[in-house]
Image (tube, helix red, strand yellow):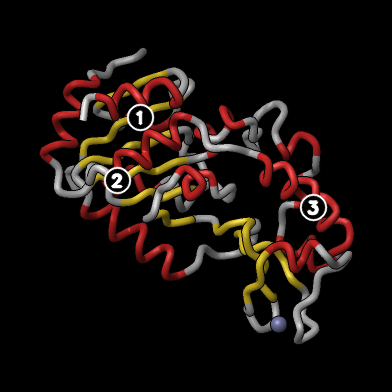
């Protein structure tokens, strides 16, 4: 059941010192990027146990990179949608201080957002599993089994299953979460830990939680305002009230 008042949310944002948005795959589906876990998502086409884990890329890099290549190509053509653009405009006007995104598609940056914490890393870069040197992803795409100058295997600079979240990313995310007065939770069912902790932590610290999702998620239980529908329609409406 929808229970949200956009005007109240806009007023809270105007009064807030710190406003943070936590975004997930749902914000990018309107840009044509399938949600990893949905019916047509990545993990319905590729077995997560053969492609999703860090051990998979180490034991069979040619196979996993073949899938990554097509995924990265899909991402390259994707364009930010009105939801990404509304968040970028809110930041520009001083009403949004940070985006914590679970997405690796760089669409927030393409929309013009500046302060983006990439919780699960990104697909713009590749990183060496041996020496941690970072390359533009194009460097890796030129090789069938991408390798670093040091001989180590390269992987996209994104978090695979079985890998920890980067320490500085966690510190930044928890910092924004503890200090925000309003948290917009957009396009995420917040089921994957540790990202799932963030709205709960924000709520415990007194923040207003605003859920914007296609359908009710586990966030609904703690949300002060919930809006169900397309983020590309709801966020521009919110931005227009600021
Ligand atoms: Zn290396």
- 166 vs 114, left or right, is right
Residue at image position (30%, 31%) is: 210
3D distance between C-alphas at marks 2 and 3: 34 Å
Mark 2 Cβ and ligand 1 under 8 Å apart? no
Residue 203 appears in the rendering: no
Residue at image position (67%, 67%) is: 126
- 206 vs 31, left or right, is left
Mark 1 lies on a secondary structure that is strand
Quadrant for residue 236, please give it: top left
Residue at image position (39%, 54%) is: 114
**10 Å crowding of disc 1: few (<14), some (14-19), many (20+):** many
Q: Earlier in the sequence, mark 2 or mark 3?
A: 3
Of residues 53 and 105, the one nearer the viewer is 105
> Which dot marks residue 69?
3
Quadrant for residue 1, please give it: top left
> Which dot marks residue 92?
2
Looking at the picture, how far across and down is residue 227, in whole percent? 35, 20
Give the number of the mark in front: 2 or 1. Answer: 2
**Ligand 1 quadrant in view:** bottom right
Of residues 137 and 34, the one nearer the viewer is 137
3D distance between C-alphas at marks 2 and 1: 22 Å
Mark 2 lies on a secondary structure that is helix
Looking at the picture, how far across and down is residue 101, in whole percent? 46, 48
Looking at the picture, how far across and down is residue 177, in whole percent? 29, 52
Of residues 164 and 234, the one nearer the viewer is 234
Extreme residue toward the bottom, this view: 150
Q: Earlier in the sequence, mark 2 or mark 1?
A: 2
Q: Which residue is mark 1?
A: 211
Residue 109 appears in the rendering: yes
Looking at the picture, how far across and down is residue 10, in whole percent? 20, 29
Q: Earlier in the sequence, mark 3 or mark 1?
A: 3
- 64 vs 194, left or right, is right
């Amino acid at each position: 059941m929808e229970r949200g008042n956009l005007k109240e949310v806009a007023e809270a944002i105007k009064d807030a010192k710190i406003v943070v948005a936590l975004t997930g795959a749902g914000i990018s589906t309107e840009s044509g990027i399938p949600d990893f876990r949905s019916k047509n998502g990545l993990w319905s086409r590729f077995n997560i146990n053969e492609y999703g884990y860090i051990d998979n890329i180490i034991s069979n890099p040619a196979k996993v990179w073949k899938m990554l290549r097509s995924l990265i190509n899909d991402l390259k053509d994707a364009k930010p949608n009105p939801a990404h653009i509304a968040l970028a405009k809110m930041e520009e006007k001083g009403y949004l201080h940070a985006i914590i995104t679970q997405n690796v598609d760089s669409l927030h940056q393409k929309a013009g957002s500046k302060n983006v914490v990439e919780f699960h890393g990104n697909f713009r870069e590749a990183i060496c599993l041996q020496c941690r040197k970072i390359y533009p992803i194009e460097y890796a795409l030129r090789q069938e089994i991408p390798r670093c100058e040091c001989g180590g295997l390269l992987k996209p600079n994104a978090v695979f299953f079985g890998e920890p979240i980067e320490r500085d990313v966690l510190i930044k995310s928890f910092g924004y979460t503890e200090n925000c007065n309003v948290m917009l939770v957009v396009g995420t069912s917040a089921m994957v830990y540790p990202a799932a902790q963030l709205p709960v932590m924000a709520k415990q610290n007194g923040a207003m939680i605003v859920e914007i999702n296609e359908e009710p998620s586990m966030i609904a239980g703690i949300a002060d305002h919930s809006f169900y529908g397309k983020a590309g329609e709801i966020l521009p409406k919110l931005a227009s009230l600021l």
